[in-house]
Image (spheres, rainbow, N blue to C red):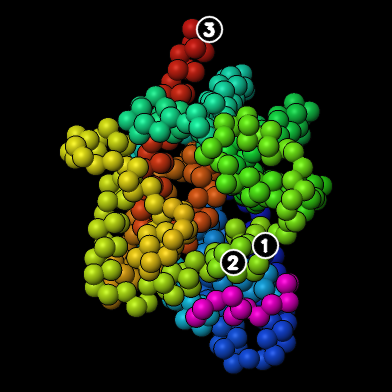
Amino acid sequence: MEFNFSNFKEEKILTLRKYLFFIIIIFSSLQLIISSFEIECFYILILIIASSIFVINFISEENFKYYLFPTFIILSLYFSCLLGPLIFKTLFFQKISSNLYYPLNTFFNFTIYQIVICFSMLTLKYFKIFKLSKINFLKNFKIFENLNEKNILIFLILIFLVRFYTGYVDQGINQNTDSGNIFARILEGMEKFIYIPLLFLLYDNIKNSKIEKKFIIILICYFLYSIFLSLSLNQRSHFFEFLFVLLFFISIATLYFEIKIFKFIFFISLIITFITPYLSKTILVNREFKDELSASDLITKSVKKNEYIEYKIKSTSDENYTENAIVDRLILIKYFDRSYFLTKNFSDIHKLSIKEFTKSRTIAVLPQNIINLFLDDFDKKDYMISMGSFTERLNGMVGGNFSIGSFLMESKLLFGKFYLLSIYILFLILFIFLQQFQKFKDNRIIYSYLPFILTLEIYHLCMSDSIVDFFYIFRTLIQYSILYFFATYFLRIKRSNEN
C-alpha cells in the first residue's frame, strides 16, 4: 500500500501537538489537586512534563512520513508509561503514585529510558541513508507485493481456514505440543496474516473514498471471528488485537486521506464500553479450564451464564496499576516497578541465573529443528516461562508461567552500568530493521503490510517482558517475509495459469 506525500495533512500533526500540550497542562493541574500537592507527585509531574517537551518534538511531519514505526515506538513508550498514567489515574481520581512500590524511582527510570530511545532515533535520522535510500535488504522477498481483489479474497478464505485450525481445532486438550512439527509451526507462523486482507480492503475503500457493503460484511465477519477466537483460545488479546490493528491503520490513513470516522469511532467506543467487559468476564471466569477442555467445550462453557461469580473489571494481582483490567492492558508502567521490587536485592548468583536463563530463552526463539542441529538435548518447552515468572521463582514465589517482567529491569541486571548503552544500540538496530519495510518511489511511500499486523506487539515492545521479545520481533518479521513471499508466489502462479 502506498501514500502520496503531497496528500499529507500537516495541520493534523500541529493539532495533535496542541492537544497534547493542553492535556498535559490540564491533567497535571488536576493531578496536583487529587494528590493534595504531595511532593512526590509533584516531582513525578515534573518528570512527565520534561519528557513531554522532549517527545513532542518528535511529533513532526518528517517523522510520520519517513520514520513511522520508530516514531510509533517512541510514542508507545511515552503513552504507556508516562502520559497514559497521568491521564487515566487522573480520570479515575487516583494519585499517580498509588499502586506503585517505588513511584518516583519508576517514573525517573522511564524518563531516562524515553530519552535514550529518542537518541537512538536521532542517530537513525543522522544517517540519512535509511531515510530515502533505495537500499532494502528484504526486497527480494517481495514484501511490497500487492494482490488484486480476487486473489486477496482467495487469500482471505485460505487464511481464515488456517486460523480456524490453529485457533480452534489445534487447541486445548487437542493441541499439538510437538515443537518439531514443521507443518503445525508453519501454520502458526501464518496466524497474523489474517489481518492482511482486512488492511488491503480497508485501504482500498479509504483510497476510493467509498465504503462498500461488501467490505462492511467482511468487517463484521472479522469482528465476530475475533470474538470466536478469543473464546476458543481463552485469550482476550485476539479481540484487542483486532481493534488495535484496525484503529492504528485508520489513524495513519487519516494523515493522507479525508476520512469521516466519527461514526466509526463512536461504534468502536460502544464495543469497548459494552462488549469488551463482558468478553473479559467470560474469558477470565473460565481461564482455569483453558488446558483441560477442547475449544468447542470451552466456547460452550463460556457462553453459559456464570451466576456463581460477581465480576468487576479489576485486576486481581499486584500487577494492577489503574485497577481497571482493560486500561491496564495499555498502561504498562507497573511491570517495571514490580520487577524492581522483586530484584532490587538480588545477589550475584541471582543475576548469573538470570543471564543463563536469558541466554537459553534467546536460543529458544529459533525453531526447534534448527536448535537440534547444534544442541541435541535442548527442548524449547523447558523455557516457555516469562522473565516475570522466573524472577518470582527466584524470590520463592509460586505462580504461573506467564507473569510479565520488565525488559528495562532485565537490562539493568544483565548489563549493569552499561545498560543504557545496550538499550541505545538495541533500539537503533530495531529502528534500522523496521525501515526495511518501507520504500520510496517518486513522491510516494510504499509500506509492506507485515509490520502493521504486528502493531500490538510493537506497542508493547518497550515494556516487554525481556530482551528476548526483541529477538522475537526480528525473527517473526523475517519469518513473515519468507511466508508472504511463498503465499504471493503461489497466488501469482494461479493468476498466470488462469490468464
Give whichever of discs 3 and 1 has the lower sequence position.
1
The residue indicated by pointer 3 is 499
**409 magenta-colored:** no
- Graded by Cα atoms within 10 Å as few (under 14), some (14 to 19) or many (20 or more), the crowding at tag 3 reads few
Image vertical order of residue 258 relative to residue 25, above or below:
above
Where on the picture, by quarter, is residue 21? bottom right
Q: Quadrant of the N terminus?
A: top right
Left or right of residue 60: residue 464:
left
Element assignment for label 2: loop
Bounds of the magenta span? Answer: 91-102
Q: Amino acid at mark 1?
A: Lys
C-alpha separation, residue under disc 3 versus residue under disc 2 = 58 Å
Give x and y (percent) for residue 223: 70, 37
Element assignment for label 3: loop
Left or right of residue 414: residue 88:
right
Q: Amino acid at mark 3?
A: Asn
Number of the front mark, 3 or 2: 2
The residue indicated by pointer 1 is 314
Image vertical order of residue 440 relative to residue 355, above or below:
above
Give x and y (percent) for residue 385: 39, 52
The residue indicated by pointer 2 is 320
Q: Nearer the viewer, residue 372 or 461?
A: 372
Where on the picture, by quarter, is residue 466? bottom left
